[in-house]
Image (spheres, rainbow, N blue to C red):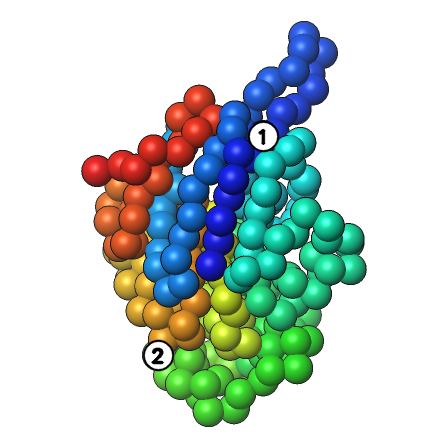
């Protein structure tokens, strides 16, 4: 599903170049999930941005669902993010003027892959049946994140990228959201790569990757 080969990325600062990713290589098989761990500033979010085409690597190869992205233009990345990729963020990023129902359906409708039966299934599994007419500001943090998860999965993406998706939630809500996320990702047939600082959240996933000095190691 995901192959990274010798990926390099640096940022230029006033006192010189800061190397964030230093020849990073790894792979994630279809249907598998991995937690990306590392200290603050180690490059975890940078790596997600490269995979999503929101930033570009200095060198190296990123293959997504069998497609080498080296020659991707902006339009190619936009189509990939619309059709085959989902992003879940710590801050939810729901459209404030849309109801829960419309937020849930947004990406699937844009991708032309809205499935009414799967929509009903997600609504029930996420406990959103009584909230569909509400706006995001009328929801708790945990409810907003459940809407974001449903929106991310309704079009059955090939890959889900999650950046600290439970970072704004309390421990109990975090555990409930993680259980739902991992179960529904499997049901959608997707792979999942999730940035987290929490070993407890990482334990929900199949693999744990530690990002240290710009390279990945398999964590215990």
The dot on residue 135 is none
Residue drawn 65% across and 67% down?
82
In the rendered image, is residue 158 in sight?
yes
Front-lying residue, 20 or 175:
20
- Spatial CA span between label 2 and label 1: 40 Å
Please provide percent x and percent y for residue 32.
35, 59
Query: Looking at the image, is 157 positioned above or below residue 21?
Result: below
Query: First in sequence: mark 2 or mark 1?
Result: 1
Callout 1: SS? strand
| Residue found at x 43% / y 67% | 190
Question: In this rendering, would 107 be left or right of 200?
Answer: right
Crowding at label 2, few (<14), some or many (≥20) Cα neighbours within 10 Å? Answer: some
The reply to whether dot 2 and dot 1 touch (C-beta < 8 Å) is: no
Where is mark 1, residue-wise?
8
In front: 195, or 170?
Answer: 195
Q: Secondary structure at mark 2?
A: helix
Answer with the quarter of the image where residue 31 lies. Answer: bottom left
Q: Quadrant of the C terminus?
A: top left
């Amino acid at each position: 599903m995901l192959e990274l080969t010798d990926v390099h990325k640096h940022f230029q600062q006033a006192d010189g170049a800061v190397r964030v990713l230093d020849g990073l290589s790894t792979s994630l098989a279809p249907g598998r999930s991995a937690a990306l761990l590392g200290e603050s500033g180690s490059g975890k979010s940078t790596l997600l941005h490269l995979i999503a085409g929101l930033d570009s690597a200095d060198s190296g190869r990123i293959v997504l669902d069998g497609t080498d992205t080296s020659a991707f233009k902006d339009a190619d990345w936009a189509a990939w993010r619309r059709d085959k990729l989902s992003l879940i963020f710590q801050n939810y990023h729901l459209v404030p003027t849309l109801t829960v129902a419309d937020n849930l359906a947004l990406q699937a409708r844009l991708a032309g892959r809205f499935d009414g039966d799967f929509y009903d299934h997600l609504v029930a599994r996420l406990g959103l049946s009584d909230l569909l007419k509400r706006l995001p500001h009328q929801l708790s943090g945990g409810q907003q994140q459940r809407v974001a998860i449903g929106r991310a999965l309704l079009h059955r993406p090939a890959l889900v990228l999650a950046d600290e998706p439970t970072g704004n939630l309390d421990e109990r809500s975090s555990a409930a959201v993680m259980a739902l996320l991992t179960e529904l990702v499997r049901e959608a047939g997707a792979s999942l790569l999730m940035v987290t600082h929490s070993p407890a959240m990482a334990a929900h996933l199949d693999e744990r990757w530690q990002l240290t000095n710009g390279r990945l190691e398999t964590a215990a």
